[in-house]
Amino acid sequence: MENSLSLTEENYIKAIFQIGTTPESNVSTNALADSLQTKPATVSDMIKKLSYKKLIFYEKYKGVALSESGSKEALKIIRKHRLWEVFLVNHLNFKWDQVHEIAEQLEHIKSSELVNRLDDFLGNPTIDPHGDPIPDAKGRVQLGPSKLLSEMTSHEKGIIVGVKNEDPLLLQHLDKINIRLGLQIEVTEVNDFDQSMQVKLPDLGIIFLSKKITSQILITKNS
Amino acid sequence: MENSLSLTEENYIKAIFQIGTTPESNVSTNALADSLQTKPATVSDMIKKLSYKKLIFYEKYKGVALSESGSKEALKIIRKHRLWEVFLVNHLNFKWDQVHEIAEQLEHIKSSELVNRLDDFLGNPTIDPHGDPIPDAKGRVQLGPSKLLSEMTSHEKGIIVGVKNEDPLLLQHLDKINIRLGLQIEVTEVNDFDQSMQVKLPDLGIIFLSKKITSQILITKNS
DNA sequence: ATTAATTTTTAGATTAATCTAAAAGTTTAG
DNA sequence: CTAAACTTTTAGATTAATCTAAAAATTAAT
């Protein structure tokens, strides 16, 4: 029962999970190669290996999807990644734009005892510093319904609940313009030409946001 | 300046540091193979690589010793190992016999920012849960003078300040007989034949300890 | 529906870390 | 001081993860 995945295997499983499969389309070799900064030939080889280990479903030229056990592994890794991010921000005073890279390493530490104790130590948080939901010990995720700010129309209101992307440059920019999770936001104007927006934030008044930014910000769906 | 060591290289550097060199004798290929649970031929190869990178001094058939930069690397790894052990014991409620293996993984996480913030979070501890000194950010270690319990003679007193070895079985045994760091100890009798001892501990009265155990326990040298 | 473009796979090498077996060097014991 | 014992190194393979180049399959375009 030498069950444990290599670091590389874990990264493939996570990437497949994050690119995401839909009933219609599996994850393609090229998409994986892009995401993992490697070459399609390399991906092709690794796919065979993961398929042999029954972590993914695979048919030649048809792309891949995670199996039950593959999903379980992915959720375990994501759980660790997000819990460590909470630790780094809440207890070591890192900023939300500084934690992704470190969590990329910490997510591979193997010890379920450690993860579960860390979870308790942190107070069993349900979201990470970017608003992403943290799977529980059994791999269950509870994600509140959300939509992109870019999908909202004039006069709609909501609360900022997450950021789609952990790019430090995006996060630093949001810091600079004082956008953070939990803020109430109201769309005051949408420009048809470039989909840029004007939005109202408490205290900060009205600010201008490009489509590039509004398409990264998640807002509560209800209300 | 691709400076960063591989996991394997780090493990070699740490093992060389821990086996320890004296002016008279370097660390031998076989000793390293033993310590790293690998074969002498493998060690021989890796030695060439580390030597090429100027992390160790090496002459064929003469064993190795760490260079200045090698020692620095070793101390960085040991600092991380011991700080994480403090975290695991003090904040996640692990026992001292459960943390070594997890710290063996955590010690390889690369981010000096992380280590230094962890150090501050922990209150800049100077010893780990086994009494081993924690190097500071500059690699300086302050170790109080100590000796082995097995080197003491009848009627000598001292305070238990450390355990030489992190073997869980040893540590669990010490737990069972209520021996822990900080206790005052007095040697009441030494048996010449097998070097076993009787010692007096506060509250616990007099207990019997085999040489195998007394040779793993560190006692203050002064007083 | 062919052809062109794109995607994916295969074939064949490469690198790091490892191994076994054998050769070479060093130490130790009579 | 030689010969046996031990240690260390070399030689040659192996495995995992990667690459480039080329072949095969699929998809898209005229």
Image (spheres, coloured by chain):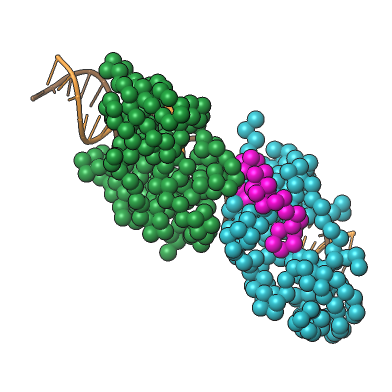
Chain colours: A cyan, B green, C orange, D brown
Q: Position of residue B148 (x, y in %)?
A: 32, 33
Point out residue A69 in the picture as x, y percentages from the top left corner: 75, 40
Residue sitting at 48 percent across and 29 percent down?
B178
User: Is A128 contained in the magenta span?
Assistant: yes
Residue A60 in view in this figure: no
Q: Which residues are magenta?
A: A107-133
- Position of residue A147 relative to residue B189, above or below, is below
Q: Tell which of B125 and A195 is nearer to you.
A: B125
Locate the N terminus of chain A by quadrant. top right
Image point 51% across, 38% down: which residue? B96
Write the residue at 78% across / 41% down.
Answer: A68
- Locate the C terminus of chain A by quadrant: bottom right
Outermost residue toward the front in this view: B203
The percent position of residue B75, horizontal first and vertical second, equals 39, 51
Q: Position of residue A196 (x, y in %)?
A: 80, 82
- State whether residue B8 is above or below residue B176: below
